[in-house]
Amino acid sequence: MSDNWLDEIKWTEDGLVPAIAQETGTGKMLMMAWMDRDALRLTAETGHAVYWSRSRGKLWHKGEKSGYQQVVVDMRIDCDNDVVLLEVEQKGGIACHTGRHNCFFKQLKDGKWVSVDPVLRDPVSIYKK
Amino acid sequence: MSDNWLDEIKWTEDGLVPAIAQETGTGKMLMMAWMDRDALRLTAETGHAVYWSRSRGKLWHKGEKSGYQQVVVDMRIDCDNDVVLLEVEQKGGIACHTGRHNCFFKQLKDGKWVSVDPVLRDPVSIYKK
């Protein structure tokens, strides 16, 4: 398969592109992370979301430790070719490293960010060997 | 109202944060753009999405020319405090400057990005005086 589709992405100076994951069916926003060229290609090739971890400086196969993989149903880019949107099936129903369904659990209420969504599983148990 | 909630955002070196807009009701992803501190504060204060236009280098009151404003229903941040999620009512049902409902109209199909969503209104007529 040609790599032309990867050349069309408007990568940042660091060679990254923001990637948004949305849950299929519910439409819930799960998370936003970053992809480099390899991550995006691997996501398309394997059908599982692969990101670039900026904090760890390496490829991040989502769910590699937790088992909470994201199976890609649909992949899109925006009008400017600088944002990727994944529609995914979220394995285990937990996308966030805090053990919540998704990463957007802090809501602005009366001038404060308030956690409004429950922890579904203790992250200590998610990441222990 | 205190500005502490703005201080909690993990701004980029350029003083920006990515902001995702999702349509209330349908759950459709509309767009991703960037906000600076003023844009985020104005979004909360006015209840209408305000972004920072990186290309124009100034505040961008979404819909100021087109009339297609975004009325904010809910505002959240993610676990790392570095992504904003807006739930909005999209006035006129058009979020994209191409005249489409949203910006994510290019789908990866057989190794190519293919436009799969219709133009609802000619952008020339949207932006003419």
Image (cartoon, coloured by chain):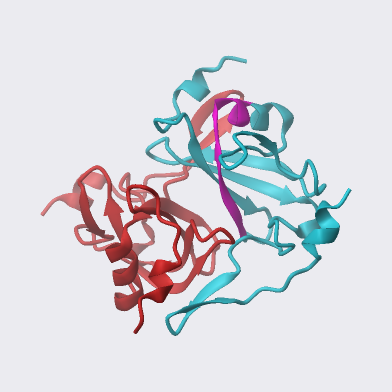
Chain colours: A red, B cyan
Q: Which residues are magenta?
A: B29-41
Q: Eyeballing the image, is A101 above or below B51?
A: below
Q: Give the quarter of the image for residue A61.
A: bottom left
Q: Residue at 31% of width from left, 77% of height from top?
A: A45
Quadrant for the N terminus of chain B, please: top right
Q: Residue at 50% of width from left, 18% of height from top?
A: B4
The one nearer the camera, B87 or A40, is A40
Q: Residue at 44% of width from left, 41% of height from top?
A: B78
Q: Give the quarter of the image for residue B41.
A: top right
Q: Residue B80 at what x, y percent from top left?
A: 37, 38
User: Magenta includes B38?
Assistant: yes
Q: How many marks?
A: 0
Q: Eyeballing the image, is B90 above or below A117?
A: below
Q: Residue A90 at what x, y percent from top left?
A: 39, 65
Q: Residue at 57% of width from left, 14% of height from top?
A: B2
User: Magenta includes B16?
Assistant: no
* Outermost residue to the top: B2
In the displayed structure, does residue A97 sit left or right of residue B75? left
Q: Residue B35 at what x, y percent from top left?
A: 56, 36
In the displayed structure, does residue A55 sit left or right of residue B84? left
* Outermost residue to the left: A129
